[in-house]
Image (cartoon, rainbow, N blue to C red):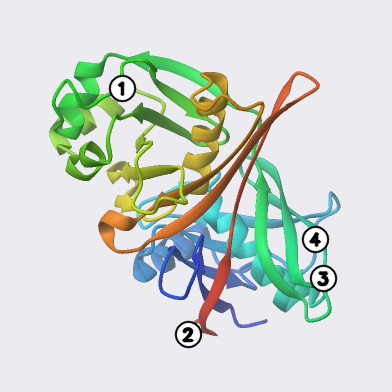
Amino acid sequence: MSTPHFYIVDVFAEQKYTGNPLAVVMNATNLSGTDMQHIAREINYSESIFILDSKPAENGGYGMRIFTPESELPFAGHPCLGAAYIIERYLLKQQTEVLLLNLRAGQISVYLHYSDSLLGLIDRLWMRQRLPVFGQTFQSAQLEEVLGLGPAAIDSRFPIQEVSTGLPFIIVPLRTLESVQQARILRKAYFNLVNKTQAKAILIFAPQTYHPQHDLNVRVFADYYGISEDPATGSANGALAAYLFKYQYVSDDNLFLQVEQGYEIRRPSLLLLSARNIDGHLDISIGGKVIEVAQGELL
């Protein structure tokens, strides 16, 4: 029996110790769901991902499961990119254009771009999102109460709405970076809201940024999953890309945005958002860098 080996990587990170930290565990076939949950809680990152087999299944995808410290998720963004990076480096050990990942929510494609094909240096990884699903909308007052904001903070030109590309989020447009900075979760109002909704996490965003080369500033709150604030969230930004495209927040038929997240909790992250209409279907991808930090064996 192979000993489970783990890797710590930073995802959506421009340099080490930024972005969203992730534990990727390989040779996890013989771990039970309870074992995985205990390990995820012990590591206590936003998510941990477990690669079940060293070879792909018949459908070409690698089986895996994702856990937060509190529960299992059917889908999450940055674990997919981190797992694809580790699979390419330590299982395939050769360059590839695309990797298929089998999640509980379905199969996800991750595309790899190399900055130096001779050296095999991975520059960016892109994850294609599932077709978006747009859910219920909310009154501004409901989210003002949850986020501790005044009535002028929310941008009333656009709806507050549940959106999912695999995992649902409540998308809240704000007017200014100052409002993003001031937002905080009032837990009683938050749980009163999410206990009645499909989406359990909230994404807020504004067009003002810390760095002028970036397009949006984002924060994501997910107390329901045991994550008070996520430093970089691929699944949430996939939902955001669909939202921005649908409501023409940016008047561009081929949306491409650089999104900063995690600055308020000192884990600055950079996510790339792409959205376009192909034959009547919305094609959404989320991209970024992955940087390896550490590795070891589970005892």
**Residue type (three-letter) at the residue carrying disc 4:** Pro
Residue 155, label in figure:
1
Q: Please state which of residues 197 and 177 is positioned toward the viewer in this rendering.
A: 177
Kindly check if marks 1 and 4 are in contact, taking CB atoms under 8 A apart as contact. no
Kindly check if marks 4 and 2 are in contact, taking CB atoms under 8 A apart as contact. no
Mark whose residue sits in front, 4 or 3? 3
* Label 1 packing within 10 angstroms: few (<14), some (14-19), many (20+): some
The reply to whether residue 258 is visible in this rendering is yes
Above or below 251: residue 101: below
Q: Residue at x 52, y 52 (%)?
A: 271
Q: Quadrant of residue 202?
A: top left
**Residue type (three-letter) at the residue carrying disc 3:** Gln
Q: Earlier in the sequence, mark 3 or mark 2?
A: 3
How far is disc 3 from disc 2 in space, using C-alphas?
Answer: 31 Å
What secondary structure is found at the residue carrying circle 3? loop
Q: Quadrant of residue 90?
A: bottom right
